[in-house]
């Protein structure tokens, strides 16, 4: 209910204006923001290519890659899909193995700050950079994108793999009124990924995990000195938080994929988990190598996520 009311309240007051101050001066916006980039008549350079860009957030320069598709047109709001790499990644890796650039959306690949062992990582992990506010970085980045491009504020989505998926789970608790839906693959759900979850509104999420993942064990383990939960326990917790049916509907897909779908959730905030039998720390339907272990081609995570995202825009929640 809080998600619906907050979205409605933001709409009623005309929403907030992006770009009126520097990113460091802006608060974190956990509500829809008008995209004043929709007033920009200019078509961006380099349509159909992936380019490197930067903004300043938290007093430091932050990098991201962006792919604006050739279908982009001024004055026509377009979805945004943010994809977060795993530890040691740089954005180009998840772009390569996921194929997110092929979606009819603005694809954005934020780059994590360097933490332990000088390796890029995301807030919520024990090896992330100390004192770096990645949630504010995401909010600042969205403010910037919506101030310069014609973004549909009701169709902003986030996905990620491994540490990136763990951070996406944190975003589901920290920015559930700004980001419409979430997709997680081989998630590293450290305790830090639950910050703010107890009091956050429900948020729709689709999750994938291999039963033979050698990095983040499906049945739970200890990673980098902290516990990670069994995946079914984690998914059930999300379903309980979203006030879904007590038990999921189970569907076998091919011979190596089992879908667990919780329905009847508050405000259409569905939870779906895909158990990938025998798969490793990989992206289902990978286009190139995505990590250790095997990767199923029975389902394509990018397409499944996109279907889930398109079914869960923010405005949908105003009607439930």
Image (spheres, rainbow, N blue to C red):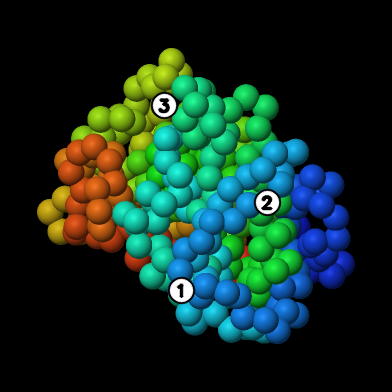
Asked if labels 2 and 3 touch by Cβ distance under 8 angstroms, the answer is: no
Which circle marks residue 48 in the picture? 1
Q: Earlier in the sequence, mark 3 or mark 2?
A: 2
Looking at the rendered image, the quarter that the N terminus falls into is bottom right
Asked if labels 3 and 1 touch by Cβ distance under 8 angstroms, the answer is: no
Asked if labels 1 and 2 touch by Cβ distance under 8 angstroms, the answer is: no
Q: Residue at x 50, y 34 (%)?
A: 121
Circle 2 sits on which residue? 55
Q: Is residue 288 left or right of residue 226?
A: left
Farthest residue in the left direction? 255
Disc 1 from disc 3: Cα separation: 38 Å
Q: Earlier in the sequence, mark 2 or mark 1?
A: 1
Farthest residue in the top direction? 225
Q: Residue at x 58, y 48 (%)?
A: 63
**SS category of the residue bearing label 1:** loop
- x and y percentages locating residue 299 in the rendered image: 24, 60
**SS category of the residue bearing label 3:** strand
- x and y percentages locating residue 79 in the rendered image: 56, 70
- x and y percentages locating residue 161 in the rendered image: 40, 44
- x and y percentages locating residue 175 in the rendered image: 65, 49
Classify 58 as above or below 155.
Answer: above
**SS category of the residue bearing label 2:** strand
Q: Is residue 141 left or right of residue 311?
A: right
Looking at the rendered image, the quarter that the C terminus falls into is bottom right
Few, some or many C-alpha atoms within 10 Å of disc 1 (few <14, some 14-19, many ≥20)? Answer: some
* Along the line of sight, the residue nearer the viewer: 145 or 263: 145
Labels 1, 3: front one: 1
Q: Residue at x 31, y 43 (%)?
A: 209
Circle 3 sits on which residue? 228
Q: Earlier in the sequence, mark 1 or mark 3?
A: 1
């Amino acid at each position: 209910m809080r998600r619906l009311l907050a979205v409605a309240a933001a709409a009623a007051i005309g929403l907030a204006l992006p770009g009126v101050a520097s990113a460091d001066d802006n608060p974190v916006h956990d509500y829809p923001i008008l995209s004043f980039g929709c007033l920009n008549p200019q078509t961006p350079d380099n349509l159909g290519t992936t380019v490197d860009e930067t903004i300043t957030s938290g007093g430091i320069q932050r990098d991201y890659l962006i792919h604006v598709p050739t279908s982009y047109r001024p004055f026509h709001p377009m979805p945004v899909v943010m994809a977060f790499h795993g530890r040691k990644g740089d954005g180009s890796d998840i772009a390569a193995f996921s194929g997110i650039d092929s979606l009819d959306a603005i694809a954005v690949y934020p780059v994590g700050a360097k933490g332990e062992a000088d390796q890029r990582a995301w807030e919520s992990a024990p090896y992330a950079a100390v004192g770096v506010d990645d949630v504010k970085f995401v909010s600042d980045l969205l403010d910037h994108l919506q101030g310069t491009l014609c973004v549909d504020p009701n169709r902003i989505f986030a996905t990620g793999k491994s540490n990136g998926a763990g951070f996406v789970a944190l975003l589901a608790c920290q920015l559930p009124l700004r980001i419409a839906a979430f997709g997680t693959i081989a998630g590293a759900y450290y305790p830090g990924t639950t910050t703010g979850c107890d009091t956050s509104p429900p948020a729709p999420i689709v999750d994938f995990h291999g039963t033979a993942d050698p990095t983040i064990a499906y049945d739970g383990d200890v990673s980098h000195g902290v516990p990670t939960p069994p995946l079914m326990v984690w998914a059930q917790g999300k379903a309980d938080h979203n006030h879904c049916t007590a038990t999921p509907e189970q569907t076998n897909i091919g011979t190596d994929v089992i879908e667990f779908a919780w329905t009847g959730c508050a405000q259409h905030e569905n939870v779906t988990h895909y158990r990938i039998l025998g798969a490793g720390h990989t992206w289902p339907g990978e286009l190139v190598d995505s990590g250790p272990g095997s990767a199923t081609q029975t389902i394509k995570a990018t397409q499944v996520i996109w279907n889930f995202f398109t079914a869960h825009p923010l405005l949908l929640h105003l009607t439930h």
